Image (cartoon, rainbow, N blue to C red):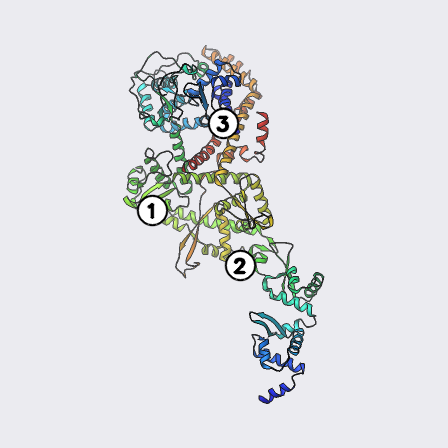
Amino acid sequence: MAEVKVKKEANLSDPAEVESRIRDLCQQFPHGITDQVIQNDMPHLEPQQRALAINKLLSLGQLDLLRNSSGLLYRMKDTQSTSKVKGSDNQEKLVYQIIEDAGNKGIWSRDIRFKSNLPLTEINKILKNLESKKLIKAVKSVAASKKKVYMLYNLQPDRSVTGGAWYSDQDFESEFVEVLNQQCFKFLQSKAEAARDSKQSPMVQRNSSFATSHEVWKYICELGISKVDLSMDDIETILNTLIYDGKVEMTVIAAKEGTVGSVDGQMKLYRGVNPVIQPTGLVRTPCGLCPVIPDTLATILKGV
Amino acid sequence: MTTQEVRLCGLLLREHFGDVVEKVGTHLLRNGAQNLRTIIHETGISLDLVKKSLCVLVQHGTCVFSSGRKGPGSPMEYRTGCDRILRILRYPRYIYTAKTLYGDTGELIIEELLQRGEMTMSTTVKTVADRLTQNMEEGRSMDYSEVSSAFSKLVETHFLQRCPPQAGAGATPAAPATADTPGTPATPVSTTQLTPERFPDCYKVPHVTLIGRGKRQLSSEDGEDQRNAKRAKMDSETHGDEGIYWQVNFERFHLHFRDQAIIAAVANKLDQTSSEIVRTMLRMSEVTTSPTATCTKPLSANEIFRSLPASYNIPRPILDQYLTLLVDDPMEFVGKAGESGGGMYVVNLHRALANLARATLESVVQERFGSRSARIFRLLLRKRHLEQKQVEDFAMIPAKEAKDMLYTLLSQNLVQLQEVPKTPDYAPSRTFYLYTVNQLPTARMLLQNCYKTVANLIERRLFETKESKRLLEKSQRIEAILASLQASGAEPEQLTEVEEMITAPEKQQLDALRLHINKLDSAENQVDETIFLIESYVNSTATSS
């Protein structure tokens, strides 16, 4: 190897040789090489030439420039992705890289502008270009309907952007939620009634009227009214709305790790309850439901 | 003393006592304690009428008098309070309760005492016996001893109490107003409010010699009877209980209503047996618990088991299970206070009242704004402070609709906004805006709404009566003619002729009118139930804080 090295050293000034040497080094260290490593390998290479070679490789799209705590890292890029952006110019590649880094949360156009320091018009042109090449796509965020986030074409948008199971195409599916709400309530109510009719001792009655969140989840899955897969957390949010409706109450019990449906050693139990009082006397009169009752005070003060 | 309360008190006074008393009463309510001269001067009513109105008010316990601001020698000052007048709204409920507990006799005793304000035992017994005899068949009459025993029972269970005697220090000549009415001697009284319970003889039945039977009135003088109900019946006999006047103990009735509300809530939430257990517990602590206590005295499970009604033969372990279930219930009606005696249990009175008041608030929001707003309201009650986005997420309501509902609730003052600034300058973009519900102020606001509602209902009823006054008078005249004709033995043709003086549409109108007035009356009673719940809750927080 010594001759090779000597030979290499002799042709130090050849930029192509430098580039291929750097590329070999990158392949040797797939996690990336620092400037230091290149320097160690070719100690007689001047920093200028080194920089030139590295820039050439970067512009060709064969090297990735990363930054870590100690300095800059150069990493070999996948040939596949290299081929994708072939034919695009530097700016597009830069924008593409930024979007790729954003992962499945997507990135807003203004943030792209900050990261790349390119003017807005350029950014818009590039984004349109990339979209037509089907490399990226725009996803409307559910939180702010005017905001569009961009992400790679083949990525699934993250839950926080689309809103999860309750949103389809940026619309909150209230009927779906309502249907689920009623189904869960009916299930719990029928369980409570069955427990009441069984006429056993009160403790057994109450315990049999409870249903774990896992049972409710299974019931809803088997009902098949949902097109999307619902997780147990989703069902728990639906059951919470039933609690806020005053129709259901919840207790938490300690459960052994490993019993079906237990999360962190706890299980949530739900049961249907009856309301505590009938609709109160005030709301049986028209005044109780009157929408203008605060305004009538003024007329009373004037008249009486 | 809010505007609504004063307006409602005015309407109640006018209906029960007339215009003059209403003027004097509302004047005193608005202006606090005043002496006789000022009242006459400011209301413009003559001395005689003012004196009589004050008599009426004092007789019914509405007005108290005390020596003036400048010391014991100055003229008497008269003061009224709203709450006593507002009790008038609840009279039907008191009478009905007495009827369910003590039968017709009890009902009539309470009714007489409510109408007269305060009376001696002997007068009450005689009047009630007479009234009962009226309604019995010919030849039978009511014995005084039966009525006396009913009276004593009422006193034993504290539903009736003696009126506090006025302190008999040196009489001053400057109190002529009260000389007419029996039972309120013209002597100055210390300014501290003397509760009847500070006197040891409060619930002691005096030894009264009452032998006789009720007398039936011979001629049908229904109209006169009504008018005489408010005047004192002058009786020449004495029965050994002069000067001992009795009044209705409203607090005791209120405790009874509160217990009933708790039992009904337990029955709704759990089941019949649990409510029976709670009823037993409350009955056992009726006399041992003070009215303002947070919870009853601890009762051991053994005692409860022994005191259960015989019809409910629940085995002991089942009773223990029911008690455990009651304790575990999130509503916290019953709490466990210890382990001795098989488990010591208490009924959490204040907490039960708070839960009932919360359920009332939720019910009002639900009926007024819909079940989704009720969901948001309950959510805020549970989670205390939430941001707008969190409300939408937890309640699973689309953002636009949730915003709309929150703003409606905010404008009606049912929900409040709490600002938590990030920077000292409260810039809107850098502040957290949290929605919250405060139960106590909201309950107070709802109470004022209830007063306004009842006042509106009363006014509507008076309006309807006034509109059809002519028709009502005509129907009354015809009834009087019919009655006199029947009494003097007339032929059927004459009767039908008189009946036909009311045409069919008029009859329809009369029926419709009667229906409306009955509905308005029952609506007043229903709103009064809400008033009672919220008032008890507000008072319970006042005493505990």
Element type at marker 2?
loop
Q: Residues within 10 Å of mark 2 (few under 14, many from 20)?
A: few
In the image, is B502 to the left or to the right of B212? right
Tag 2: residue type? Asp
Q: Residues within 10 Å of mark 1 (few under 14, many from 20)?
A: some
Reading the image, the residue beneath label 3 is: B521
In the image, is A45 to the left or to the right of B363? right
Visible residue check, residue B44 = yes
The quadrant the N terminus of chain A occupies is: bottom right
Element type at marker 3?
helix
Reading the image, the residue beneath label 1 is: B321
Quarter assignment of residue B282: top left
> Viewer-proximal residue, B147 or B32?
B32
Cα separation between marks 2 and 1 = 41 Å
| Callouts 2 and 1 in the same chain | no
The percent coordinates of residue B291 (x first, y second) are 37, 33
Task: Examine the rendered structure and indicate whether residue B519 appears above or below residue B127.
Answer: below
| Callouts 3 and 1 in the same chain | yes
The percent coordinates of residue B376 (x first, y second) are 53, 45
Cα separation between marks 3 and 2 = 56 Å
Visible residue check, residue B515 = no
Element type at marker 1?
helix
> Viewer-proximal residue, B216 or B545?
B545
Task: Examine the rendered structure and indicate whether residue B369 appears above or below residue A72.
Answer: above
Q: Which mark is residue A177?
A: none
Tag 3: residue type? Asp
Q: How many marks?
A: 3
Tag 1: residue type? Gln
Chain under callout 1: B
Q: Residues within 10 Å of mark 3 (few under 14, many from 20)?
A: some
Reading the image, the residue beneath label 2 is: A229
Quarter assignment of residue B472: top right
